[in-house]
Image (cartoon, rainbow, N blue to C red):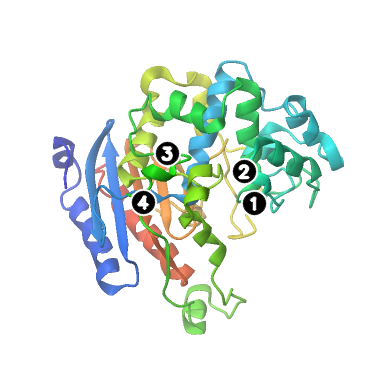
Amino acid sequence: MNTTNEASALADGGLDKLRGRLQHAIDKGPLPSLQFAVARHGKLVLFETLGNADNTTRYNVFSCTKPVVASAIWQLMGASLIRIEAPVAHYIPAFAENGKQAITVEQVLCHTAGFPRAPLSAPAWWTRAGRLEAMRDWRLNWEPGSQMEYHPLSAHWVLAELIECITGRDYREYLQANIIAPLGLEQLRLGVPVAEQGDIATLQHVGEPPTSKEIRDLFGAAIEWPSTVDHSLLMFNEPEVRELGVPGGGAVSTAADMALFYQGVMNNSGELWQPEVLADAIGRVRVHFPDPMTGAPANRGLGVVIAGDDKYLPHRGMGSRVSGRAFGHQGVGGQVAWGDPVSGLSFCLLTNGLDANLLRSAQLCAAASNRAAACWPG
C-alpha cells in the first residue's frame, strides 16, 4: 500500500515497476514471501508483502543488522566515550591475547581486523563470560589493517562487548533504549523474547544452485561455485537464538522499520548522533582494499557500505541507480537495506526464502534496488 502523499511526488509509475518486479519473483518462484518498503522525508511511501505472509510479518534481516549495531558505536563516539583509533584492548583488556593488542575499534568496524572467521557459538555465546573467554582465545588470520575480508559474525560480537563494557548495559537493551525506541521503530528488535516470536517468518531453503551455463553467462567463464547451501543459517529459526540476538546478523524487523531506520539516520531524528560523527561514519570511505568476494574496492565506512561513484557501484549491493553517497548493507539470502542522502529515499527488501541460486538472489536485490532508486524523479 502507498502510505503517504509522498508517493505522488515520485516518478510516474516507479512504485508500480518496483511492485511488478517483485510480484514477478514471487510468481516465478521459488521464494515463499517478500516484503519491501520505500520511505522518504521520514515517512513510508510504500510498504507491501507478497506471497504467504503479510505486513505484520517480521523477518530475520541477517547482516542488515550490522549498521544498527554500528549506530550505537557512533553514538558513543559522539559522547566521547569511545575512540575508534584506540585499541579494542584499551576497553576490553582480555582481547589483547594472542597478538590482538593493537587491533583498533576502527578496524573492527571496517572488517580489516584480521579475525574474519573467529569462532563464537553455543555454548560460549549464551553468557557474557563465555563470549569474553572465546574472544580471548581468538587468533589472527592476517596482519590487522593489511587487507579487508568480511567478518560475518566475529567483529560484531566485539562491538557488542564494547557497548556493554563502556555503558554498563546489555547491548540489546542499549540498542532498544537509545536507538530503536527513540526512532519509533516498533518491529525492529535485536533479541526477541520467545513469547514474542509468533510473527517471525520461518526461514526456508529453496531453489537449486546455479547451472554452469548461468555462471558462464554472468562471468564469461566457468568458475568454481559452491555446490551446497549453508544449512547453519537455519539456526536463526531457533527460538533461543532469536532471543540471544546475534549482533552480526540476528535482528528481526519489518521492511518498513528498516527503511525508517535509514530515514532516522539520514535525518538524524531526535539528534541521536553528533552531526560531525554521523556525517563521517556514513559519508567517508575508509577502506579501499578489494573485497575478496567481489574483487571491487570494499568502500567501507564505519559499519556501512558506501556506494561510491566508480564502475564497481553495482557490486556493492545497492544496484546501479543510487547516488554515490548512498550507504547501507546486504544480508545473506537476499536482504538489503539502504538510504540515499541525495534522493532522500530509503529502501528495504526482505525474504524468508534462502535461495540456493545466489546469482538469482543477487540479481533480484539489484533489480529491486534499481527500481526503488528510480522512483526519485531527479
Q: CA distance from mark 3 to mark 2?
A: 18 Å
> In the image as oriented, which residue stretches furthest toward the right?
98
Closer to the camera in the image, 339 or 200: 200
Tell me the mark number nearer the camera, choosing from 3 and 1.
1
Task: Tell me the element at label 3.
Answer: loop
Decide: marks 2, 1 in contact (CB < 8 A)? yes
Q: CA distance from mark 2 to mark 4?
A: 21 Å
Image quarter of residue 354: bottom left
x and y, in percent, of residue 187 in the image: 34, 39
x and y, in percent, of residue 334 in the image: 42, 59
Q: Earlier in the sequence, mark 3 or mark 1?
A: 1
Task: Tell me the element at label 1.
Answer: loop
What kind of residue is marked 4? Ile
Q: Which residue is mark 4?
A: 200
> In the image as oriented, which residue stretches furthest toward the front?
195
Q: CA distance from mark 4 to mark 1?
A: 22 Å
Q: Which residue is mark 1?
A: 122
Image quarter of residue 226: bottom right
Task: Tell me the element at label 2.
Answer: helix
Image quarter of residue 28: bottom left
Q: Earlier in the sequence, mark 4 or mark 1?
A: 1
Q: Earlier in the sequence, mark 3 or mark 2?
A: 2
Q: Is residue 84 left or right of residue 343?
A: right
Residue 189, disc: 3
Decide: is 354 above or below 280: below
Q: CA distance from mark 3 to mark 4?
A: 11 Å
